[in-house]
Amino acid sequence: MASVTQHQMQKFREDGFLVLEHFFSPEECDSMRSSIQRILDGMEVPPHCRTEFSTKEEEQLQAQGSSDYFLTSGDKIRFFFEKGVLDERGNFLIAKEKSVSKIGHALHAHDPVFKQITHSSKVQDRIPTENSALWCAESSKRELWKVSFQELGRKLGLERPVVVQSMYIFKQPGIGGEVTPHQDATFLHTEPLGRVLGFWIALEDATQENGCLWFIPGSHTSGITRRMVRAAQGASTCVEFVGSEPAYDDSKFIPVPISKGGLIVIHGEVVHKSAMNSSAFSRHVYTFHVMEAEGTNWSKENWLQPTPELPFPPLYT
């Protein structure tokens, strides 16, 4: 059984991201996909609440930034759509289940499958079951992980991590939108910096063709220059950007394809992006962010805030 090594921890500190292939079994990935399908089957979103997901500043301010539906989604399960799939009245131009960009931001709190995946304290031995025996036999090169998110958090030095948000991202075939270069700390700001981590689980193979992540290794050491904050009361949008985003050198990005079941740990300040999915294959992902709460202040200017109904829950149970 594989465990996270000191060498891997050192690579994470140097690069700002860590790739752990085959962290989850195919059955665990399929259980998350089945759960999200049940949520999609029950999806009801009033036309005036339908917003398009974007990381581009102007589009974000026009779509999400003007919508209370986005701003109050931190303790709920809500739906966000790909660019160009809605008409001017908010009606779907394609099948609604094929138009969803992401579902967020509290799957970890409200869905039992995602809650179990996120918070399980069990050390998963990954012993082959009847359904997974073939998977294990097919590739002797595949390492089986004996580690949970709780154990991984401790190896990463997290003393009191809390889960701040979770998302299911679809990257729909043919229309899955580009995610422009960004740092997660732009949207999830803490004082001091360096207290936010993302856990990104590939539920299907993520390739260069269907929109895998690209990183600038080492870019987490330069701080941030831009923040998305809640706008002042009475403003025309719910959020605004302060500061400016630097122009990134495309030649510094490296692609990070990963197989179904793989996990990427993402430092909150590392610069990353993904291209539009122009392939015929989707790229489903479950991702969530944690904050080290010990000695950390969560910015009251962040769009996402804990609520009385859902304070940020501890990762460790």
Image (cartoon, rainbow, N blue to C red):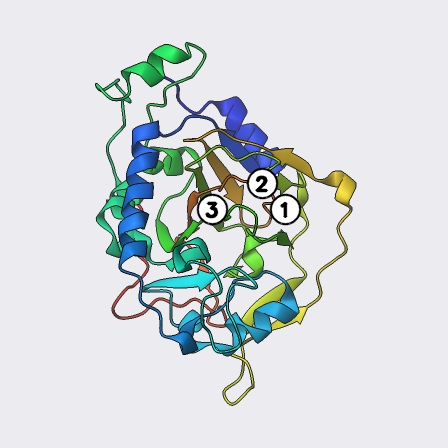
Pointer 3 with pointer 2, Cβ within 8 A: no
- Residue at screen point 64% across, 41% down: 215
Q: Is residue 87 left or right of residue 144?
A: right
Is residue 78 visible in this depiction of the protein?
yes
- Residue at screen point 55% across, 56% down: 185
Indicate the secondary structure of the residue bearing disc 1: loop
Q: Between residues 10 and 45, which one lies in front from this camera angle?
A: 45
Pointer 3 with pointer 1, Cβ within 8 A: no
Q: What's the residue type where badge 3 is placed?
A: Gly
Residue 198 shows which numbered tag?
3
Dot 3 or dot 2, earlier in sequence: 3
Q: Between residues 180 and 183, which one lies in front from this camera angle?
A: 180
Q: What's the residue type where badge 2 is placed?
A: Ser
Q: Between residues 132 and 187, which one lies in front from this camera angle?
A: 132
Indicate the secondary structure of the residue bearing disc 3: strand
Q: Is residue 218 left or right of residue 292?
A: right
Question: Quick one: label 1, few (<14), some, or many (20+) residues within 10 Å?
Answer: some
- The residue that label 1 is drawn on is 275
* In this view, 80 is above or below 283: below
Residue 63 shows which numbered tag?
none
- The residue that label 2 is drawn on is 279
